[in-house]
Image (tube, rainbow, N blue to C red):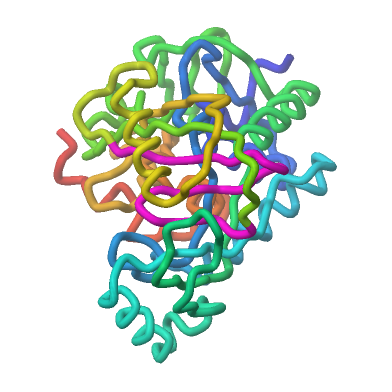
Amino acid sequence: MKKNYEFVIIGQGIAGTVLSWYLIEKNLNFLIINDPKKASSSSAALGVYNPITGKRFVETWKAKELINKTEKFYKKIENKLKTKILYKKNIYRPFHNNKNINDWQMKLESRTFKKYIKKLDIKSRYNLMNDDLGGIITKKSGYIDVTKFIKLSKKYLKSNNHYKEIKIHPNDIVIKKKFIEFDKIKTRNLIFCIGSDQNTNRFFSWLPFNLVKGETIDIEMKIRLKEIIQKSILIIPTNKNLYKIGSTYEWNDFENKNTIKGINELKNKISAILDSKYNIINKKFGIRPASKDRRAFVGFHPQYKNIGIINGLGSKGVSLAPYCAENLLENILKNKLIDNEINIKRYISLYS
């Protein structure tokens, strides 16, 4: 394996994996380093992309650009890996009350939302679902099979000598004038994509991370749903009678395991939506590296111009990662400015 690289990426979660594919596309010399013993929030990610977000159902930041880039990117990866990882699915949002119905009827008249709305129903869509008031079906959404994406990408990276499993401590990194060195590896550019661990990394711990723990479960049940269901949680139909459910949001307790509290919360929310028996077949958790202003962290260290970061993607990792990776690389290769809203320079006043 080579010891000198143009790029070294630390972390093989969603951000690091996406960035590695951009480097492959550009035929650049790189290595991705991963600590296999460290749990990644990506392992519990539901992988949903969606142009409408939040409790107030607003248009996602840069929705049109992000959705187009997301689908285009993962289709390319499907072709490269010769397997399916992108699943386009509409989202069905059962109405909570009459005000909810009125709000969506107003959105039907809006140019912003009209292009995303497929159908408004004022009657129940599914048996065994508590949706007596009906609901809204929106489009231009879907999910990425994150587990398969990361697992098969890792296999591809390994087979092409782009992957190494070692634990790197930031204090072991030696910064020279023209390169960075650690563990007998030299690189011109070092990019951190280490999720919640970034909060304690000496290079970028000054950024205002807002960590949140999420728990998810995989269940098996006999009813068949066509769309992703969104009503306080997401119910994602994946394969036959299998569904992904999530996620919880825990802002204080970061216990490194699934909890009774988290699982019970998910079970209670399922019961509030569906009147159906099911079996829990898997439990997952992850600590998402969100940011205070809900925008990603992309850019370079104020002092070390060849040490970069992609982080703070929160729950929108699969759709934000391609946009962020492209921004970072175009800055390096073409000197193109990074989008101000995600550039870490917006927090330069916090660096000392």
Please report the residue visible at 62 percent of the width from the left and 48 percent of the height from the top. Answer: 223
**Residue 87: image location, x then y, percent:** 68, 53
**Residue 256: image location, x then y, percent:** 35, 16
Residue sitting nearer the eye, 21 or 138: 138
Please report the residue visible at 40 percent of the width from the left and 40 percent of the height from the top. Answer: 247
Residue 2 in magenta?
Answer: no
Give the farthest residue toward the bottom.
109
Residue sitting nearer the eye, 321 or 128: 128
The reply to whether residue 184 is in sight is yes
Q: Quadrant of the N terminus?
A: top right
Residue sitting nearer the eye, 242 or 69: 242
**Residue 297: image location, x then y, percent:** 35, 45
- Vertical comparison of 348 with 176: above or below: below
**Lateral position of residue 103 relative to residue 236, left or right:** left
**Lateral position of residue 171 relative to residue 155, left or right:** left
Give the farthest residue toward the right.
82
Q: Quadrant of residue 89?
A: bottom right
Q: Quadrant of residue 82?
A: top right
Residue sitting nearer the eye, 8 or 166: 166
- Vertical comparison of 74 with 250: above or below: below
Please report the residue visible at 39 percent of the width from the left and 38 percent of the height from the top. Answer: 305
Residue 231 in magenta?
Answer: yes
Please report the residue visible at 44 percent of the width from the left and 71 percent of the height from the top. Answer: 135
**Residue 105: image location, x then y, percent:** 38, 85
Q: Quadrant of the C terminus?
A: top left
- Vertical comparison of 285 with 26: above or below: above
| Residue range (magenta) | 226-249
The reply to whether residue 9 is in sight is no
**Lateral position of residue 135 relative to residue 351, left or right:** right
